[in-house]
Amino acid sequence: MAKRKEEELLKEIVGYFKTYIFEKHISASLNTHSKLKSYNINPIVVKYLSKVLENDYTPQGVAKALFYPRVLGTSINTSFGTRIQNMFVELEIANGSLIKGMDIEFVDALDKRKKWCQLKSGPNTINSEDVKPLITKFTTTIQLARTNRALKGINNSDFIVGVLYGEAEELSMHYKEINKTHPVLIGKDFWHRITGFENFYEGLVSELQKMINDLDTKNLMNEGCKKLAEEINASPLFIF
């Protein structure tokens, strides 16, 4: 019974990733990021980057300089973070948090205590300047929460950072600093606590890989760049 529930949840999450993260990213790449109006352009930099990419200043080079970093960087990273938070709530794995600064709330499968969680993608996704404000936010939130009788008995370990992928030894020094006062749960440990299944993380990584291998991305970069290059070539912003 438990195994069946684990398999069903894996299927739901993989399906969510496919529909709301990867397929939406593919669609946006071809229909939004391939349009010149979606970019704020530094004409000097794009000329240089075109020269780096094509050894010449061409519409194709400018298109690549704009399209590649958008599609391979900012676009997918932005949608990933937002969608993952929504996924936990929409699939009823967790609840959206009513406490400012927290992303989700769930009952920890190991210690059975309610956790208020701020989600992060990976083990190197915060900077040094993020550490103090995050700890201050947690401390202030706990102090406010303790004035609410319904939240009596909460402690530092109930307010956590959940890191979606990676291993504990990969955590940056910034996360390790946070972990001194508030638990930073990463990868297998995080997914175990939020789903209740000990080996869920490994299964998720495996099933996501299978799904990704089946995605049709054969002409994505070429088609997107071609559309953008055509607009660039016709634009009065550029003289080739």
Image: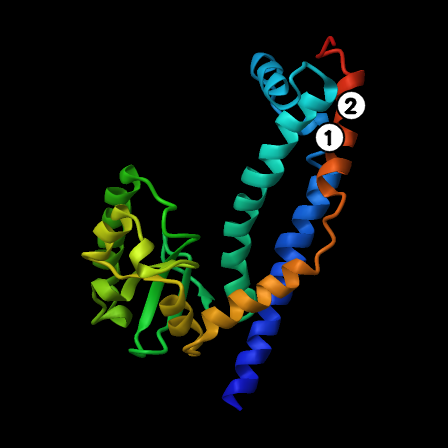
Relative side of 122 to 54, left or right:
left
Q: Residue 62: percent from the left, percent from the top?
A: 67, 21
Q: Up-down: is 67 above or below 153? A: above
Contact between marks 2 and 1 (CB within 8 A): the answer is: yes
Quarter of the figure with the C terminus = top right
> Is residue 77 shown above or below 164?
above
- Name the colouring of the figure: rainbow
> Where is residue 14 shown, x and y percent of the image?
60, 66
Task: Identify the residue under disc 1.
Answer: 35
Given residues 206 and 89, the one toward you in this image is: 206
Give the percent coordinates (x, y) of residue 13.
58, 67
Residue plotted at (55% across, 54% down): 83
Secondary structure beneath disc 1?
Answer: loop
Task: Identify the residue at horizontal 58%, vertical 68% (top origin).
Answer: 207
Residue at image point 75% right, 39% down: 31
Q: Which residue is mark 2?
A: 231
Task: Decide if residue 89 is in sight here.
Answer: no
Q: Amino acid at mark 1?
A: Lys
Residue at image position (69%, 43%) is 28
In the rendered image, which quarter is residue 19 located in?
bottom right
Residue density around tag 1, few if under 14, some if 14–19, many if 20 or more, within 10 Å = many
The amino acid sitting under disc 2 is Glu
Pointer 2 or 1: first along the chain: 1
Q: Who is closer to the viewer here, 58 or 184? A: 58
**In this view, 77 is above or below 146:** above
Count of numbered marks: 2
Mark 2: which secondary structure? helix
